[in-house]
Image (cartoon, rainbow, N blue to C red):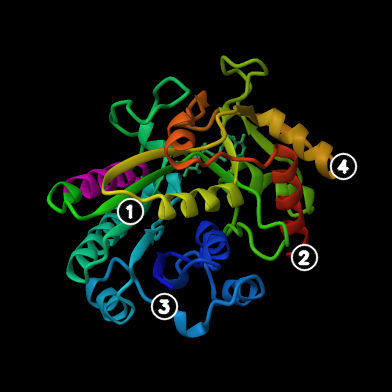
């Protein structure tokens, strides 16, 4: 069985990928626990037989520490997820984002070259499109991004593209995630934000569980049918399966794909979908717009469907039910 290394593999998205890959790949994880914990591993082990010895606590931005681990793994493929991901924090602490996210990507490429790993899947974000008109297409030019987090994703993509130009035996796939939400249907793993959630569905989940009194809707005067911004919410299990498709369908060269559903949902539509699925009322208070929010961000998903044969299948109702199952298991 071939070995795949998941950097940041104990995090929200990595742990779901580990579950989906375990039947066909030996999964090894490197994680610095910056936004995850070893408790996550206990829960993950209830879903897949990943050995404790295959989980390494190390920082990918530290080449010496990372190489010590990498040399013992010598993976056939890497799925590079490790990185800071909070937009607001990246504006406050830009150097922390540039240091961590860019060094981690550079180190992954350095070690791929040094240890003959020839397949890389990179966790990118729809945020690289900046304020362009949806649906976003992979062939759109990447313009100036809106914050340091987005910039680290765009710069990492370019770093990988340029690396591949000089390594013709390499296959890299960049996956641009739209809005990953939901949880594994078991309720064992899901997203657990530290402190106040930045993202919409985790916040709704906490209102439903009584941790927060109401949802603040950041503006209802946008040019959309109900005045609230539109996003492309994708179930994290669909997203995880896109990584399986990318890994199994990897071909030589550099490839970029959107990973979304192609469908737009407004903030208020997501609130209603959650209320309908769970029968729990979510009080909302409309507040000022949040700086930097786009009116609309949805994916054109025709390329990934055509080339990798992957398509999201889970509904908004499933997203809300699975998210709620996870949240209610946390109490
Ligand atoms: N929103 C609220 N109230 C909240 C939280 C969010 O009204 O408490 C609104 C936002 O204003 C936005 C929508 O819900 O209109 C979605 O916001 P999220 O923070 O959930 O998601 P974003 O689309 O802003 O950002 C997400 C990720 C980024 C990533 C981006 C890619 O958080 O890391 O998608 O498009 F870059």
Magenta-colored stretch includes residue 161: yes
Q: Quadrant of ligand 1?
A: top right
User: Which image quarter: residue 151?
Assistant: top left
Q: CA distance from mark 2 to mark 4?
A: 18 Å
Q: Nearer the viewer, mark 2 or mark 4?
A: 4
For marks 1 and 3, the one nearer the N-term is 3
Placement of the N terminus among the 4 image quadrants? bottom left
Q: CA distance from mark 4 to mark 3?
A: 41 Å
For disc 3, the marked residue is 57
Q: Secondary structure at mark 1?
A: helix
What residue is shown at x 60% (from left), y 57% (from top)? Answer: 191
| Residue 117 vertical position relative to residue 153 in the rendered view, above or below | below
For disc 1, the marked residue is 97
Q: Secondary structure at mark 3?
A: strand
For disc 4, the marked residue is 279
Q: Which residues are magenta?
A: 149-162
* Label 2 C-beta lies within 8 Å of the nearest ligand 1 atom: no
Question: How crowded is the residue under tag 2: few (<14 C-alpha within 10 Å), some, or many (20+)?
Answer: few
Q: CA distance from mark 3 to mark 2?
A: 27 Å
For disc 2, the marked residue is 331
């Amino acid at each position: 069985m071939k070995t795949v290394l998941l950097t940041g593999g104990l995090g929200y998205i990595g742990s779901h990928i580990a579950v989906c890959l375990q039947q066909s790949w030996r999964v090894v994880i490197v994680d610095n626990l910056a936004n995850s914990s070893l408790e996550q591993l206990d829960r993950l082990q209830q879903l897949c037989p990943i050995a404790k010895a295959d989980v390494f606590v190390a920082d990918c931005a530290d080449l010496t520490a990372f190489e010590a681990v990498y040399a013992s793994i010598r993976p056939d493929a890497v799925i590079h997820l490790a990185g800071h991901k909070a937009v607001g924090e990246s504006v406050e602490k830009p150097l922390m984002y540039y240091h961590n996210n860019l060094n981690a990507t550079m180190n992954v490429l350095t070690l791929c070259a040094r240890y003959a790993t020839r397949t890389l899947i990179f966790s990118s974000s729809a945020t690289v499109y900046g304020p362009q008109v949806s649906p976003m297409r992979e062939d759109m030019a990447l313009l100036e991004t809106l914050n340091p987090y987005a910039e680290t994703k765009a710069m990492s993509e370019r770093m990988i593209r340029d690396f591949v130009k000089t390594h013709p035996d390499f296959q890299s796939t960049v996956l641009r995630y739209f809005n990953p939400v939901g949880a594994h249907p078991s309720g064992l793993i899901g997203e657990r934000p530290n402190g106040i959630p930045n993202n919409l569905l985790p916040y709704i989940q906490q209102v439903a569980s009584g941790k927060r009194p109401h949802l603040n809707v950041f503006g209802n005067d946008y040019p959309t049918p109900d005045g609230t911004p539109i996003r492309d919410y994708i179930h994290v299990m669909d997203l995880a399966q896109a990584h399986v498709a990318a890994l199994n369908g990897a071909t030589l060269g550099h490839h970029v794909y959107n990973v979304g559903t192609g469908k737009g949902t407004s903030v208020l539509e997501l609130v209603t979908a959650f209320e309908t699925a769970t029968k729990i009322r979510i009080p909302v208070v409309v507040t000022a717009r949040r700086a930097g929010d786009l009116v609309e961000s949805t994916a054109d998903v025709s390329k990934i469907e055509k080339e990798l044969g992957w398509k999201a299948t889970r509904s908004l109702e499933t997203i809300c039910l699975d998210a709620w199952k996870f949240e209610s298991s946390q109490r």
